[in-house]
Image (spheres, helix red, strand yellow):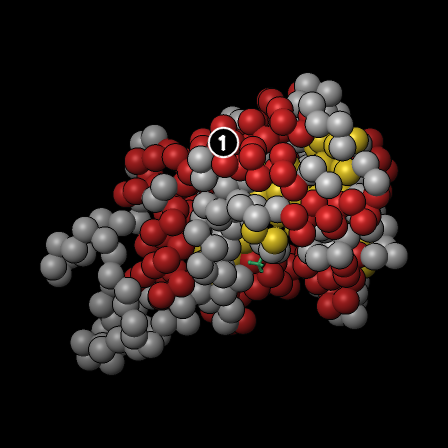
Amino acid sequence: MNKGFETLAIHAGQEPDPLTGAVVPPIYATSTYKQDGVGGLRSGYEYSRSANPTRTALEECLAALEGGVRGLAFASGLAAEDTLLRTVCRPGDHVLIPDDAYGGTYRLFAKVFEQWGLSYDPVPLGDVDAVRAAMRPNTKVVWVETPTNPLLGIADISALAQVARDGGARLVVDNTFASPYLQQPLALGADVVVHSTTKYMGGHSDVVGGALIAAERGLGDELAYHQNAMGAVAGPFDAWLTLRGVKTLGVRMDRHCDNAERVVELLAAHPKVTAVLYPGLSEHPGHEVAAKQMKRFGGMVSFRVAGGEDAAVAVCDRAELFTLGESLGGVESLIEHPGRMTHASAAGSPLEVPADLVRLSVGIESVEDLLADLTRALDF
Ligand SMILES: *Cc1c(COP(=O)(O)O)cnc(C)c1O
């Protein structure tokens, strides 16, 4: 279906139900399917771990939005990551990960896959030469996040795809922060896109989920095999909620970006703010790369507060409309202190984050209200 992004978000994988004409794909709350004689499957459905029509609708939509050949929906972003790593890596392999990777991703490598015999090195993804130098003969994956969490670092996806290709490794891009509306890694040379659909894709903070989207058929089939063999699938209710959210991804992302730009403007001029981390700022070290590979710069904004950790914590506590909480990408604005919350598990590791850092997930509320809340939170 060669259609525009918003058309795909609303229609890809979502033909009206053949039985009733229902415009919205129903929640197929069933574990199994009647066979018309032994092995006589209707439309290939046999058992809902292997496939479920509600999940299929979401998976086809995700594949279309990322420009991939195969989409797979999982119970969470980390379940998707686990399935991906056990599909493409074997004990004894090596991977490169961002030196400010998402905390849960770091923990998966450091605490789970390390014991399984997979070694890893954190690298500064903004430095392509450093990534090339860190490649080893047994490096199987270069894991990219861009923008990164919570420091909003930018990695050049096409340059890193070349490094991975030259070294016989696969390039994986966690596209959770940007969403396919702002950035399409497969078109830039990535082999697989990972999502925590919990965030912008679902967009309403009401469902946890994950996804993998593969650029080519062979890997897509291997991932699908492992999805079924390992079993961490999205249930039909969760798939339905996620797909409902995905329909409005484009309009939500544009408003997230509009509001984030206004928030950045306010913070950049505020005397209590010592630094604003946002790839849309011309002084951001990754600005040019971000401008090349992203449509806009997203809804995530981090900033450092004069006065250190106590001041940063105070801002988080004082905010009201910005709800104090982990996660991101929902319609409601969230604020958090990465050092004590999302990234507490990285303390003492190479991924430790500055103590004076505050992270915002800028929502789509009326922007004047968001600006007023931040102004008040910073007035202590
Ligand atoms: C939340 C998140 C994950 C993990 O996804 P879950 O759905 O929480 O398992 C992975 N990567 C990034 C960038 C995230 O923000």
Classify residue 274 as left or right of residue 152: right
Q: Residue furthest bottom?
A: 38
Please name whichever residue, 325 or 218, is drawn nearer the observer in this view of the structure: 325
**Residue 39 in the image: x percent, y percent?**
27, 76
Quarter of the image where one finds residue 157: top right
Please name whichever residue, 256 or 269, is drawn nearer the observer in this view of the structure: 269
- On the rendered image, what quadrant is the C terminus found in? top right
Image: 289 above or below 209: above
- On the rendered image, what quadrant is the N terminus found in? top left
Image: 256 above or below 141: above
Classify residue 242 as left or right of residue 199: left
**Residue 159 in the image: x percent, y percent?**
69, 29
**Residue 372 in the image: x percent, y percent?**
56, 35
Residue 10 can be seen in this image: yes
Please name whichever residue, 181 or 254, is drawn nearer the observer in this view of the structure: 254
Classify residue 43 as left or right of residue 187: left
State ligand 1's quadrant: bottom right
The residue to which callout 1 is attached is 368
Q: Amino acid under label 1?
A: Glu
Classify residue 107 as left or right of residue 235: right
